[in-house]
Amino acid sequence: MSPRRTRIPAKDFKKNNDAAIKSGPHNVIYAYQAHDINRETAIKKLSHMGVSGKLFAGQLLIEKSASAESADEAIDLLGQAACKFMEAENAPVDNDEARIKRADLFKSRLFLGYLPVYAYMIAERTLPAFKAAESAYQKTVNIGYKVLEEIKQHDSRSESYKKRTNLVGLLGEISILGLTNRAAVYEIGSESYFAVPATVQFDRANRHGTTVDKSSDINVYCDATGIYDPIYKLAIKSSDSTFDKSLKFSPEKNIRINVSPDLEKYPGELYVASEIINELYSEMSGIFYNEEISESLDCRTEKMFDIFDNPPTNL
């Protein structure tokens, strides 16, 4: 399904960007959702819009594969999605956009790691078997650790605040995805319960930027509701410092998880998402591992599941 990985020459990447329409990838998505353009047009435009555009194009191709008329067509579309994600991931390192939008590069890598899961769900019409699920979980943890390393290396004097903020936000999402699928793979069973990163259909749905509405970063599926109807739609925030706690949950809208303080091991714990990623990586790799790390992850997971099942409300 995945073609040979190649790095895009800088001149070709620039040519594609120059060929893009002036509005930018987010406006193309808004036009698509408003039915001003169809999905094919959106994919075509986004494919020439640099890192973010290719990330969105790949997500739209995943969504298109879900309604394919045959398994072969679905696999072909997922192969096209893989190309888009790899083009985003392999953008020239000296490209200004590639440096600024590191979060989108890592998110493309995350979607690339979950393509076998999407393929399994679409082809088999069921949640993924253990092998595919465990592979996706391990890739989640490895990517999260790379994002954490990138944040630690960030030089605030020479690099943009927005770049670091986007990386921190992505780290929060990956920490929740990792915790959920750790439990899914090794405790609950991935064929009964599994989470995937949300595509455009969910992630950009009615997004206003300040409250939890209908958008989600992660979708959790279970065998009781099936692969077309997530049992939980999660909007992830690194902390509650920016958002009013009273807006945390409303009926018929999505659950918001504030990684800090919701999943603190002790009151006032700093850098909770970073600690979760470090713990997941240590448990998976065995580096600096001890039993207390698994106990900490179990504790955080229980807190997370409590929020899933009993989301706070301001009513």
Image: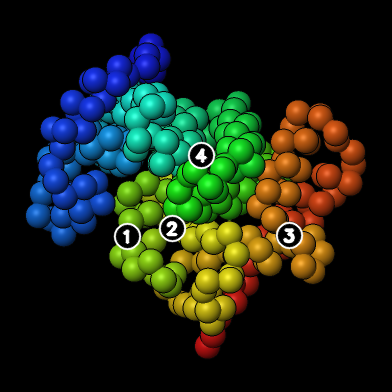
Name the N-terminal-most of marks 2 and 1. Answer: 1
Q: Nearer the viewer, residue 45 or 309?
A: 45
Tag 2: amino acid = Ser
Q: Tell me if 263 is positioned left or right of 313 in this view.
A: right
- Element type at marker 2? loop
Q: Earlier in the sequence, mark 2 or mark 3?
A: 2
- Residue 216: assigned label: 2
Circle nearer the N terminus (1, 4):
4
Q: Secondary structure at mark 1?
A: loop
Q: Amino acid at mark 4?
A: Leu
Specify the farthest residue to the left.
36
For marks 3 and 4, the one nearer the N-term is 4
| Horizontal and vertical percent position of residue 180 | 63, 49
Label for residue 270? 3
Q: Nearer the viewer, mark 1 or mark 4?
A: 1
Disc 3 marks a residue whose amino acid type is Leu
| Residue under pointer 4 | 127
Q: Secondary structure at mark 3?
A: loop
The number of numbered badges drawn on the structure is 4
Depth check, front residue: 51 or 85 = 51
Q: Distance between the Cα atoms at labels 3 and 1?
A: 31 Å
> What is the CA distance from the residue labelled 4 to the residue labelled 2?
19 Å
Q: Is residue 1 above or below residue 263?
A: above
